[in-house]
Image (spheres, rainbow, N blue to C red):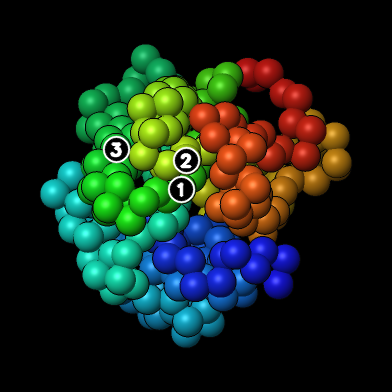
Amino acid sequence: MKYEELKNRKVLITGGTQGIGGAMAEAFASEGAAVVINGRVLNEKVQKVLDRTGAKASMGSIQDPAVAGEVVKRAAEINGGLEVLICNAAGMSMGPYLESVPEEWWPQMQINLSGHIACIKAAVPIMERAGGGTVILISSFFGTMGWNNATGYGAFKSGLIVLGQYLARKYRDDNIKVCTIIPGVIDTPQLHVDANDLNISLDEVREMYANDIAMGRIARPSEIAEAALYMASDCGCRALNGRHLIVSGGEYRSIP
């Protein structure tokens, strides 16, 4: 194990059923952590993640603040506590800004931002009683610069960055550390949204994005998981408390 201190650490990962979340579930489980994953519904795909990682499940859509709170409380009951909360669940729709409608914006806000605010509100008292903990927010480089046809997603992911800075200062005396990962383009199912918006194939999207990345390819979910392991470690949560880490492989595009 690279992080001995993560053995038996009690972890909840929202959106832990695929992509980055699934990779983090595998990574933390491999370090011996007690992992609970969250997703909307327990289906065959989710069960495969549970079987593969040995994780437990606390299901429910965090878009509803009341459900989000129950997801966190249930995870703490399953594990006998909560030491690491990873706010990873995400949703994105794309379309021209002037054609966007509230019916497209609000679900993105609820899952990308307000849902995680509700999760953290439920987690903080649990962590306070235990003497501390770590919250890891998964933002996006779209939230640092905006992106064509992804204005809502970028705006709400930007909110996570500021939220993390505030929370780290607010709860420093409670020994609750808050860090933020800003992934670049990652090879996850979310790329299908980009491909559909651009009306090109998934392979064409991968090639197009790779051309603007210094390392010559888009990142793998496991590489974001590695950053999360470091942030959850005793050294990482102290070093990056209140700060963010961009994991992009040298992404240097501007808005197209």
- In front of the other: label 3 or label 2? 2
Amino acid carrying label 2: it is: Lys
* Frontmost residue, 192 versus 186: 186
**Which residue is situated farthest in the top direction here?**
98
Give how far across and how far down residue 160 sits, in percent: 43, 31
Q: Residue at x 65, y 68 (%)?
A: 4
Q: Residue at x 57, y 65 (%)?
A: 6
The correct choice, above or below, for 79 with respect to 189 in the image is below
Give how far across and how far down residue 102 sits, in percent: 23, 26
Q: Secondary structure at mark 2?
A: strand
Amino acid carrying label 1: it is: Thr
Tag count: 3
Q: Residue at x 68, y 18 (%)?
A: 254
Instruction: Measure how far apart labels 1 and 3 are at the Cα level.
Output: 15 Å
**Residue at image mark 2:** 177
* Frontmost residue, 203 versus 180: 180
> On the image, which quarter does residue 215 sit in?
top right
**Residue at image mark 3:** 117
Question: Pointer 2 and pointer 1: residues touching (CB < 8 Å)?
Answer: yes
